[in-house]
Amino acid sequence: MSKVFLLLCFLPGLLLVQAHKHHKKIGFYELKRGDLRLNLTNYGATIISVITPDKHGKLADIVLGYDSIDSYKNDTVYFGALIGRVANRIRGAKFTLDGKTYKLPANDHGNTLHGGARGFGDVVWSVESHKKHRHVTFTYDSFENEQGFPGKLKVSVTYMLIGRHKLAVKMIAKPVDKATPVNLAQHTYWNLRGHNSGDILSHTVQIFGSHITPVDRLLIPTGEIISVKGTPYDFLEPKKVGSQIQEGLYDMNYVLDKSFKKHLSKVVVVTDPVSGRKLELWSNQLGLQFYTSGQLNATKGKDGAVYRKHAGIALETQGFPDSVNYPYFPSQIVRPGEIYKHTMLYRFTTS
């Protein structure tokens, strides 16, 4: 399986599965513009690889992942996956909506993480459309009471290349019959030096968020919103990840300094001094989960790589964690007739 996957998925320009509506087989899809190339699968609407040039023009895959679909099915760290129905954590694996309490799978120390035991990253999505080298749209119909959540939800995600250096990700969700919380996230792990190049502690990061939602020992928000000033979470000016990391990892939601005059605001800039690669991310969301993979532990990845602590950075734009249990956090409740829209725009350059 692994060798077949590699051969088929990474041969440039090869479309493995003809995309048509409601297609439920697992397939692999390539997008390519100039030197920017993506490989994706409709299993979990997952990004498998992102291949870009460094400052010398040398190509490398800059996202962590696996060689086989079986590995993605057994994955516990959400490499490249589209997360839902509600990304991040829900305290006590329950919430109350319109007077009714909903109980969810407790898959993370008594709490619900990333949609439950079988979230959107663990299902086969339909392929709505695929224009070779330009875009692919995956859709999923989440059923009533899936992982304990109320109502039916129609979800789509489009991955689209814009020009030669930009990747747009557009997530849309529409409740069919009941109000439900929705908080989708894209969970790719980035290492701009190359997925198999070691840790990201020398990467420089600038986050356009001056506040965070601090958490307890189980990474559940305390309900506070505090300034990053004077804390190790202050990345308002560019800093190396390893310069102030504490307790082994970052895994924190930033309250973004969003400009409400703009559809998209700049969220984060990441640069690698060795390769010269630079990633800029814009989004329309209010939060960013900044995670430096401190919990990876000799995870066997693609191309024979072994991913250890701090092997990648996850940059997940999102609503605030556990918003369903904090009325004063921005609401994630979407009602029938309303549409959830989440846009991300990545720009890849070198310097």
Image: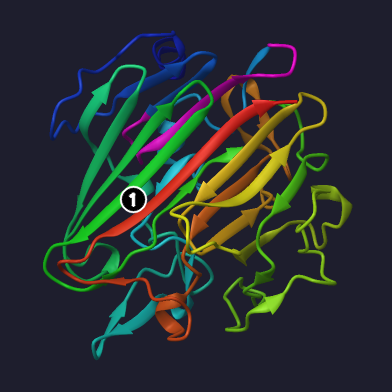
Magenta-colored stretch includes residue 153: no
Residue 137 in picture, x, y percent from top left: 27, 35
Q: Is residue 165 above or below residue 317?
A: above
For label 1, the crowd category at 10 Å Cα-Cα, with few meaning under 14, some 14 to 19 and many 20 or more, is: many
User: Which amino acid lies under the numbered mark 1 shown in the image of this protein?
Assistant: Phe
Residue at the image position 63 percent from the left and 80 percent from the top: 225
Residue 130 in picture, x, y percent from top left: 26, 24
Please name the residue that numbered disc 1 is placed on: 120
- Between 246 and 265, the one lying in front of the other is 265
Residue at the image position 24 percent from the left and 61 percent from the top: 339
Residue 198 in picture, x, y percent from top left: 76, 32
Residue at the image position 78 percent from the left and 40 percent from the top: 203
Which image quadrant for residue 219? bottom right
- Between 262 and 82, the one lying in front of the other is 262
Residue 296 in picture, x, y percent from top left: 66, 46
Which residue, as the protein is rendered here, is positioned at the far front?
Answer: 261
Q: Quadrant of the C terminus?
A: top right
> Going by the image, does 228 lie left or right of 125?
right
The number of numbered discs placed on residues in the rendered structure image is 1
Which residue, as the protein is rendered here, is positioned at the far bottom?
Answer: 99
Q: Is residue 141 above or below residue 132?
A: below
Q: Is residue 24 above or below residue 16?
A: below
Q: Which residues are magenta?
A: 41-57
Q: Quadrant of the N terminus?
A: top left
| Residue 191 seen in the figure | no
Which image quadrant for residue 33? top left
Give the structural element (helix, strand or loop) at label 1: helix
> Going by the image, does 314 lie left or right of 47?
right
